[in-house]
Image (spheres, helix red, strand yellow):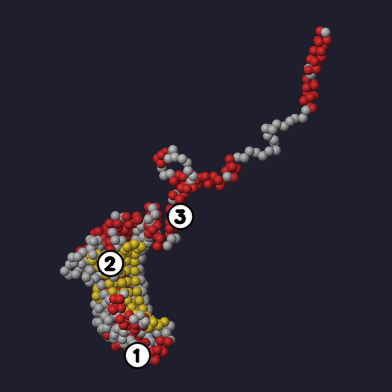
Amino acid sequence: MLKNLNTRRRRRNKADKTTPEQETMSLSTQKPQPSPNHDSPLKKRRPSWSDLWRENSKAINRVLFNMQLQSLSTPNSADCKSNNNLKSKTLIPNLANIDRTLLLSDELLFKILSKLPDSQRNPNSLVCKRWLNLQGRLVRSLKVFDWNFVESGRLSIRFPNLNHVDLINACLAAPSNSGILLTHGDVSFRIGSRLLPNGQGLEEHLLSVEMVDRALQALASGCLNLRKLVVIGASELGLLSVAEDCSTLQELHLHRCNDNVLRGIAAFENLQILKLVGNVDGLYSSFVSDIGLTILAQGCKRLVRLELSGCEGSFDGIKAIGQCCQMLEELTLYDHRMDNGWLAAIPYCENLKTLKIFSCNKIDPGLGPDEYLGSCPALERLHLKKCQLRDKNSLRAIFRVCEMVREVVIEDCWGLVNDSFSMASVCRRLKFLSLEGCSLLTTEGLETVILSLKDLKNLKVISCKNIKDAEVSPALSTLFSTLKEFKWRPDTKSVLASSLAGTKTGRRGRQFFRKL
């Protein structure tokens, strides 16, 4: 039995034992099993960070934009620390409370604001300080009422791009609580209840010359692009400081001007438009004589438009202007105090195209015979407004000097009768005639002149009460039919009656309005 058990054990051991050769044979016959985690050489390479950035650029940009909005919504780190314990909220509900214009540069926002209409500029300046500063860069013209605002330099900081500044109201130290408002031309200001005995009520309200000069220096140093300046009570030194810094100044209005002030005019090399206001009855007294006009003529040789208001002078001053200012095209005389004979110097202005005479009690009554008078060959327009035309010699002289004009406007002038108006027949080249407020002129006087003007194309007759429709002759009505432009309204009462026809206002009068 024991032998049989031993033999069985030996057989089992032989069956379990294998030789190395058999093991290699068995391994070679088995096929390799690919591992599921083993990388195949045919697979693509792992994507890099640059590939992921390009593929997800839109999502990254959206994340960056939200982060920027979140940084804008949290102004400082202290607020962030205080809000750490708050629950996180989405950005979408907070978009309405975020100023998205902060993402725009000043240049881009300035271009956007410049495209808006002028009516929205004042409301836009109330949005924030940034919009206020940008809106100030859009302002080009300004009328100043506070003198300290100019003298302190805040004007140029607040409005750096100004090219038109009006300092008239700022030059007046008038009480703000006064109930007396004084208006003269374009100037309106409040004055005290006490007026000087001589009627010069404005002298006591004007600032000193030194204060005006200091403010002009501050204005000139900050507004280098200034093109138009209106000032009252300046001196020669103040004008020189403006001329030194503002080389592009083209228009200057000087109120309360005199001969000494005009010495600083020569420094303005590019000055083209000049207005001088000397003496104003009831406001202030200042004098501009032939000396000042000669200084002006020698210094401002590029003048195109010149207005003399309340200025004195004579033939010599006007002659100097005509000889030196050869580019002068428009001359305006307002309430002039010229000596007799000044009108004879007008022909020296060879390129003069427009002559305006406003609010003058006299034109030039002291002229001699017609042989001493010449005419302006380039003169095209004559405008007389609110002048005394009772002197026939003055009216004859002015029509003789302006005989080459093509347009004549006579508005609200006193003393124009048929005999005086008949002198306008020398203007043979006249094409446009306008008569308004000439109450003494009749239909007969109008017909005498109009029928002699062969080149007349435009006629305007308004508020001339002695010119009647019933007195118009067939020859005059035939001429009316050939005109290109015709405006006929001589009798304002007839026009008013026709416009009120059917309303019963003309018959009832004040009883009608009492019932209303």
Q: Is residue 196 left or right of residue 94?
A: left
Q: Amino acid at mark 2?
A: Ser
Dot placed on the residue nearer the N-terminal end, 1 or 2: 2
Q: CA distance from mark 1 to mark 2?
A: 45 Å
Q: Quadrant of the C terminus?
A: bottom left
- Measured from the top left, where is residue 95 in percent x and y? 47, 49
Q: CA distance from mark 3 to mark 1?
A: 68 Å
Is mark 1 in CB contact (under 8 Å) with mark 2? no
Is mark 3 in CB contact (under 8 Å) with mark 1? no
Mark 1 or mark 2, whichever is nearer to me: 1
Read off the residue under disc 1: 471
* Few, some or many residues within 10 Å of mark 3 (<14, 14–19, 20+): few
Q: Residue furthest top?
A: 2
Q: Which residue is located at x 28 percent, y 79 percent?
A: 511
Mark 3 or mark 1, whichever is nearer to me: 1
Q: Which residue is located at x 44 percent, y 49 percent?
A: 98
246 versus 372 height, above or below: above
Q: Amino acid at mark 3?
A: Leu
Q: Nearer the viewer, residue 154 or 513?
A: 513
Q: Does residue 484 appear in the picture of this structure?
A: yes
Q: Which residue is located at x 31 percent, y 55 percent?
A: 153
Dot placed on the residue nearer the N-terminal end, 3 or 1: 3
Q: Amino acid at mark 1?
A: Glu
435 versus 127 height, above or below: below
Read off the residue under disc 3: 108
Q: Is residue 61 left or right of residue 315?
A: right
Read off the residue under disc 2: 188
Q: Residue furthest front?
A: 515
Q: Quadrant of residue 269?
A: bottom left
- Measured from the top left, where is residue 281 in percent x and y? 22, 72
- Measured from the top left, where is residue 144 in percent x and y? 31, 61
* Few, some or many residues within 10 Å of mark 2 (<14, 14–19, 20+): few
